[in-house]
Each structure stands twice: as C-alpha cells, then as structure tokens.
Amino acid sequence: MSGTPSEDAYALKAAETRLVAAPDLAYRPPRPRTYAPRIALVGAGGISFAHLDAYRKAGFDVAVICNRTLAKAAERRDEFFPNAAITDDLAAVLVRDDIEVLDITTHPAEREGMIERALLAGKHVLSQKPYVLDLDTGERLADLAERQGVKLAVNQNGRWAPHLAWMREAVRTGLIGDLVSCHVSIHWNHGWIKGTPFEAIDDLVLYDFGVHWFDFLVSLIGDRATSVYATRARAAGQEARPPLLAQALVEFDGGQASLGFDGATPFGPQDRTYIAGTGGSLSSTGPDLGIQAVELTTMAGTARPALAGSWFNDGFAGTMGELLSAIEDGREPLNGARANLRSLGLTFAAIASTHRGTPVVPSAVRGLEEAKRSPG
C-alpha cells in the first residue's frame, strides 16, 4: 500500500551504502606563498609550547620571545628557537621595525592592553583564545586594527584540527546540502586542572574549553543561532573546583545543535561529532581530540577520508598560517577577531543560561561578567 512505512523504517534500520572515494578538500593548515615575517611571541607560559612547536615545524621565523619571567622565555627559546632573542620588555619589542607579527598568548585580562599597544605600533596580532572578556572590547580592538591597517586574528586552533576542518569544508562546499543539525559529545578527564590557575575559572568548561566547539558551530551556521539553553553541574567525586559537566542546546534557523561536555570521565574517553544535512551526513569518532575517523555519507555512498596531521599542533600552525596568508592576500583571516565575536557571543549566552536557568538569545549578552549575573 502506497504511503505505508516499511518495517525497516519503524525499526530505524540503516540502509547499506557502498564505499566511495573521499573528495579532496582544503582542510590542511594554510601557508603563505612567499610572505615570511619575523614573529614575536609574547607570553611563554602554558600553551606557548604548542605555538612554538607548530611554528618551528612550519618554518615560521620566531625572532623574539617576550615574557615577564626571563627564565621562562629562555627555556622556551632553548627548546624551540635557539637563535631567538629574549626579553621581559614589551615596549622594546614594539619598537623593532623587523618584527611585523605578534603572537600574544597571555590571559584575556592582561592581553587586552597588550593587543592595543601592538596594534597602535602597527603590528599584526594573533590573540590567544578566548579573545576578550566582553564583546564591546572585542569590537573596539577590531575597529582599531582596521584603522591601523593591520590584521587581528584569534587562535581558535580547533578550526584546523584535521577532522573539524575537513567536516567544515564539506559543509561549506555543499556536500551535505543545507545544514540541519550538529551534535558534539566529548567525554574526557579534565581533572588535571586541580591545583592550576584554571581552577579559578568558574565557567571553565564552557568558556575556556567549550569555546572551540561554539566557534566550530559558528563556522557552520554563521549568525543563524536564535537561542541557547545550557546547564552545568559538578560530577560525583570530582576534586577540581569548577563544575566539570556542561551541555548546551542551540536553536538556529532551520536546525538544531547540541554540545555535551563530560569532563569527569576517567576511563574510556570518547569524542564524537555528527552533522546532518538535507543531502548527506558527516561523522567523526575517536578516543580523543587527536585520533578521529571521519565519514561522509550521501546518496553516492560512504567516504572515509584518510586525514593527515592532528589538532596538536596542526591547529596552531593553522591559526598563524591563516593570519600570514590573509596579510599576504590583503583579506580578512578566517579566524579574524571581528568574526570571532559571534563565537564569543554564543559562548557568553550559554554561560548566562547556566546561571539564569532559561534560554538566552546570543545577541543579548555582551560579556562574561554579565553572563555570570542573573538578570534583575
């Protein structure tokens, strides 16, 4: 009888698909053709090892490492760029004509003033993420960069994690039709933050960690998000101070998204992303951020690309490489600061929702402190 569902439809039984060749997509970290400026890294703590290791492998020219503690700058120099100069004086870096690009890796509160000084000195800047603590500051710095005729980008290194970059390009090039949904679930042990400065960040999972996936989602849907509902909780037995569990539901025009972060999973970690469109779907699964198996399924069949590289440290080579390419081409970088405000706006809205217990419109929250306050 026409119109009667099959037994397989009732049982949600999957149809078999044939294996097909994977399309060749531009997912690898971008590189400038000939532009090879001298770079100064400002802030030699924490994550700077990933920046420097990526730049060394990419052949970028790090000429100065600046840090308030010279011993730390010397340690990073000796490990990654033995010929680099070291200093604890940012002003001395800014007056050097041979330094064209600054990579500023410090925390947001102190980074704001450093970015402003660098832009006023006519330097291009790569800012660590999260970019700023409020959208007004982010817009002001983006405006300043435009007036100064320089580029300002954000180290959203997840944009060039191989699996995320390949899936983004698949969506961008229309391989799955119109986007309908995006669902991310990450289960890992974030308890390592106990006893570190990260314990002071109350909304750590959504703000410092989750911002990668809010940014990934924005790279797929642009400014289409209409509301966010999010929750957070302390996990049974967790010792670190900030809640290690968080989740967010995002509504957007014509679709939905969910981000689940289980940061208290001591055994059997898993990282999964599923994206559906009107003409196909994408999935990526693995035990962690670096080991992922990607599939693209359409009417033609299922493709399983053999991706090269890993998030650490291709993602970091990607953020700097894209900035350098944008400078060379005279265009805005994909990870440009102004565009990154959408990702931050979605992040702030999710944080606000956890504190207010209600859905929040992304454009309604301007900053992290505002997000942490209940309205009224």
Image (spheres, rainbow, N blue to C red):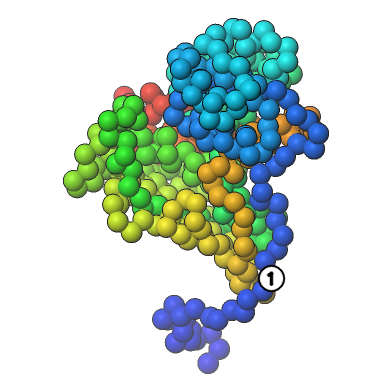
Task: Give me the residue at 63% from left, 39% from top.
Answer: 57
Residue 176: x %, y % from top left: 63, 62
Quarter-of-image position of residue 158: top right
373 and 310: which one is in front?
Answer: 310
Residue 359: x %, y % from top left: 38, 41
289 and 365: which one is in front?
Answer: 289
106 and 3: which one is in front?
Answer: 106
Residue 241: x %, y % from top left: 25, 34
Residue 228: x %, y % from top left: 43, 43
Task: Give me the residue at 47% from left, 61% from top.
Answer: 285
Residue 257 in sight here: no
Quarter-of-image position of residue 60: top right
Task: Give me the residue at 44% from left, 29% from top.
Answer: 46
As drawn, is 72 to the left or to the right of 233? right
Rendered view: 375 above or below 233:
above
Q: Quadrant of the C terminus?
A: top left
Rendered view: 312 above or below 167:
above
Q: Which residue is the site of mark 1?
A: 21
